[in-house]
Amino acid sequence: MSPLNLLIYFSLLLHSSYAQLITGEKGFSLDLIHIDSKRSPLYDANLTDFQRIVRSIDYSKSRVLWLESMMIARANPTVIRPPLRAMPPAIFMVAVSIGSGNGLRNYYLHMDTGSSLTWTQCLPCSTGFPQSAPKFDPRLSATYHVVGCDDPVCKPPRYKCVNNRCEYNIQYFDNTFIDGVLSRETFSFQDAHASHRVAIRNLFFGCTHSSNMDYHENPAGIFSMSRSPTSTVKQLATRTDGLFSYCFFPPETAHTSFLRFGHDIRTPRGGFQSTRILAYPDCEAYYLDVKDISFNGRRMRFPRGTFTRQSNGTSSFVIDSGAATTHLTTYAFDRVEDVMKDYFRHRLNLRPVNDSSLPFRLCYKMMQGIEQELPTMTLHFRDGANYRIQQSGLFANFARKRIFCFAMMPSNNISILGAKQQFNTWIRFDTIHNKLAFAPHDCRRDAA
C-alpha cells in the first residue's frame, strides 16, 4: 500500500466519531491483516503464490530461532550467552493510532503473541529503518509521558535507569537491535464493527530512538500480545475481561478477519473446548500442556515429558501467531515424519519426492482423489482437551508443481503451534484465568 493510500485509509478512520472507552463498553474488534493479503501494505503483486509460501516459511524458521533464543535466555538469566536471534517479521498486522492532537500518528504494527512490549520508532531517531508513516514525535503529543525509574516495571534485566528515565536496549544477532525509552501514551483503535474509535490512555509502549532492524516501510513496529504486564493485551485486561480472540483463514481469501477483544468475542455453535495455559515467571509466551499426538486417530504414545518445558527453557510447546506453520522438536518431528511416510507408502504406494526448491521436508506427487485419503493429526492436552488439525492445515499444495507437502518443520529446542494449523479454528485467550479455548469454525463466517 502506497503512502497516499495509507493516508486515505486512516483519514477515513479519523473522520468517524471519536469515543473514549467507558465503563460498560467492554469489547471491540480490529481488522486483522495478513502480510500476503491484497489489503496488506506489504503485498507484492510481483510474487507468485509459491514465492509467498517460501517467504513465509523463511520468516517462520527465523521466528522459531528467535523464540528459542529468547526462551532459553530468560530461563538462564545468570548464564553468559550470545545475543538473541534477530526478530523477524510476524505474519499478521493491525492498524493503530498513537498519541493525541497534532501528535496523533497512524501505524501498521505486527501482531506478536511472543513480544512483551509494543513499540514504534520515535523522534529524535539517530538510526532506524525506513517506514512509510512519519516516525512518532512525542514532543507533539500532550498525552505522552516518559516512565521514570521509580515505576515498578522498570526492573533489570529488561529495563535500566538512565537519568531518571526507564530505558531498554535489546541486542540481537547480526548487529540488529532496538534502543529506546519506556513510555506511556494514548492509543486509539478503530472498532471494525462500529463507527467510533476506542481511545485508551496511559498505555505502556516503547519509544524506540535507535534501531537496526530488517524492516522496510511497514510495519512500523510491534503490537505486543504476550502475558507480560507491559504487553498491550495485558494492559487492556480490565477493560476486556482479559479476553482476546481470532479466527485465521488463508491470505488468498477475499475477506477480512478480526482480532476481537472482550464482549465482542462470539461463541461458536457447539461451544469451545479449553485447556490451560502454563505460566512461567521468566517467560510470557503461551505455553501449552501437550501430552501426546495422534496420527489419523491412533496415539503415537510419546514418552512422558516430551513436550514439557525443561529448567533450561527447552522442550516446551507454545502457541504463536507469528510463526507461519507448526514446528516440532527434531525428535517429535522425526517420529511424525516416519509415521507419515509409512502411511503413504503402505496405503497409497507413494514415495517422497526430492525437490530442493520446496520449503518443506516431506513432499509427494499429487494423485487423483488424494484429498479423500489425507490423514489428520490431533494434539492431546493433559487436561483432556483435544485439538484436531484438519487436512487443510496439515498439508500445503503446490498446484503448478503437482506436489503436496507435510506442512510442518523441525526445530531444535521447542515445539510451536503455528498459524497455518490454526486456520479455520476459533481461538480465544483468557489472560486472567490462563485458559486457551478453541473450536473448529469456517472463519469466513467471522469475516467481512
Image (tube, grey):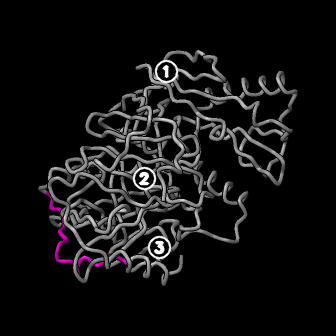
Kind of residue indicated by mark 2: Asp
SS category of the residue bearing label 1: strand
Q: Looking at the image, is mark 3 or mark 1 nearer the viewer?
A: 1
Disc 3 versus disc 1: distance between alpha carbons?
43 Å
Answer few, some or many: residues within 10 Å of disc 1's Cα (few below 14, many 20 plus, some between 14 and 19).
some
Residue at image mark 1? 291
For residue 112, which numbered disc appears in the image?
Answer: 2
Question: Nearer the N terminus, badge 3 or badge 1?
Answer: 3
Magenta-highlighted stretch: main secondary structure?
A: loop
Question: Where residue 374 appears, x then y in whole percent?
Answer: 73, 32
Position of 238 compared to 369: left or right? left
Q: For residue 29: magenta?
A: no
Q: Which residues are magenta?
A: 135-149
Question: Where residue 8 appears, x then y in whole percent?
Answer: 44, 81
Compared to residue 50, the image places residue 332 above or below, namely above
Quadrant in the picture for residue 255? bottom right
Q: Residue furthest front?
A: 269
